[in-house]
Amino acid sequence: MITSEEIAWELGRQAIEEMQKGNNQRAFDIFNKALSFDPFLWQAYRGRGLIYVGWGNYQKAIEDFKRAIDTCSDESYIVKICYELGNVYESIYLGNRFEFFEYLEKAFAVYDKIIQIYPTYIPARYRRGCIFYDIVMKSDYSQSLLERIVEDLDFVLQNESEDIDTTMKMDAVQKIKVARLLLSAEQ
């Protein structure tokens, strides 16, 4: 006898295939059906979250990413989902012309949590360094913030990964230069 969890798992697999084909509405419907068989199928929440991001429905994406995190027991996937959640918070902040600072703070908290779990996760180090940089460029800054920019972005450059492309590397180099210049001006 096939269990409801096995049915949900198979539906989740089908939904992922539909997403890969670009059939997001069909994938979304299949994820919903999978969740009717197993409300703890974190992959379905993650998949729906990614679809919501593509549709620009960030609040729903946040809800589903949080559910995925709550129902997932695999730490390596939790880190990836947290990263996606942080990106959504940043997108809200950036898309609203920097008016919603609390979303930048939420993104920072998510990236910080990732780095506590997985200190060498390069994308989170890069994003956190960029947030420090944004804060410094928009407000009064402290030497410790400048040092954190250099620390995070230098770590990214020293520990190259396939997760970071040439544009990100060049961006990191530029931000480190500015931070070091500001640090030297303070001394």
Image (cartoon, rainbow, N blue to C red):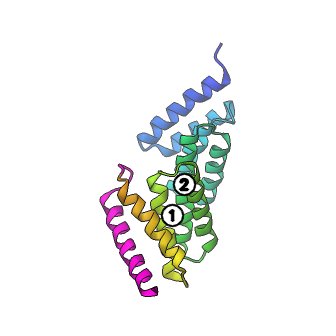
Which residue lies most toward the front here?
Answer: 187
Image quadrant containing the C terminus: bottom left
Spot occupied by residue 179 in the image (x, y as percentages of width and height): 42, 77
Q: Which residue is drawn at 34% across and 73% down?
A: 174
Callout count = 2
Q: Distance between the residues labelled 2 and 1?
A: 9 Å
Q: Main secondary structure of the magenta part?
A: helix
Nearer to us in this view, 157 or 171: 157
Instruction: List the residue tagged with mark 1.
Output: 128
Query: Which disc is residue 115 wearing?
Result: 2
Q: Which residue is drawn at 55% across and 85% down?
A: 140
Inspect the image, locate mark 1, and give the three-letter code of the amino acid beneath it. Answer: Arg
Inspect the image, locate mark 2, and give the three-letter code of the amino acid beneath it. Answer: Ile
Q: Earlier in the sequence, mark 2 or mark 1?
A: 2
Identify whether 12 is placed above or below 182: above
The reply to whether the C-beta atoms of the residues labelled 2 and 1 are less than 8 Å apart is yes
On the question of residue 58 being in view, the answer is yes
Q: Which residue is drawn at 61% across and 74% down?
A: 101
Q: What element carries label 1?
A: helix
Q: Give the range drawn in magenta.
A: 161-187
